[in-house]
Image: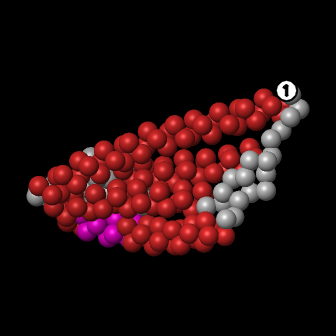
Amino acid sequence: MSQFVQSFDRKASRTIAFAQSIFSYILLIGIGLVTFEVICRYFFNASHDYADEGIVHVLLFAMFGGAATALEDNRHINMELVADHLTGRANRINQLVILTLVLISCVIMAYFSWMYMLFLIKAEAASETTVPIPYYLGPLALLIGMILTSLSALRKILVLASGQAEPEKGGHIPK
């Protein structure tokens, strides 16, 4: 395996692991926000209008950030019915095709979320709550998640194409 592939593999894995920890903390913020809102609403009879919008955006970041983590840790949905019966070269080709399609779809989704996010920023769209929450946060979450998922897919494509690793049964690629 070339020096470039090894370096890219190492840096991409570190980047995704760092993002995983950031998105874990974001999920904790969401849990804290929900807990805060439940306490305020049911114990003090004082709900906040911005809490629903905030929770949605926090969970969007956690969900789309988790997509890259799921692909990286081989915890994504896989067609194991087909992949379990493939061995050797057929399994490698199957995984390369799947990962290439994942990469292409992530790049397309990242592009259009970028365009939509720019539109929302230009329109200065925000929620009409006491604490205005910008609407571009949803497309930003999708953009970040798709960039990280693309990075994970590209890392796995390079590792498979270089021959460093063989897909395991079920198509999973070892780290």
- The residue drawn where x is 72% and y is 52% is 132
Q: Amino acid at mark 1?
A: Phe
Residue 82, can we see it?
no
- The residue drawn where x is 62% and y is 70% is 122
Q: Nearer the viewer, residue 104 or 21?
A: 21
Position of residue 172 in the picture relative to residue 52 (left or right)? left
Residue 11, can we see it?
yes
Above or below: residue 9 compared with residue 105: above
Q: Quadrant of the N terminus?
A: bottom left
**Relative image position of residue 106 (x, y in whole percent):** 44, 66
- The residue drawn where x is 60% and y is 57% is 137
- Which residue is under mark 1? 43
Q: Is residue 101 covered in magenta? A: yes
Q: Nearer the viewer, residue 119 or 150?
A: 119
Numbered range of the magenta stretch:
92-102
**Relative image position of residue 50 (x, y in whole percent):** 75, 47
Q: Is residue 105 covered in magenta? A: no
Q: Secondary structure at mark 1?
A: helix
Q: How is the image coloured?
A: secondary structure
Main secondary structure found in the magenta portion: helix
Q: Residues within 10 Å of mark 1 (few under 14, many from 20)?
A: few
- The residue drawn where x is 22% and y is 61% is 158
Above or below: residue 52 compared with residue 102: above
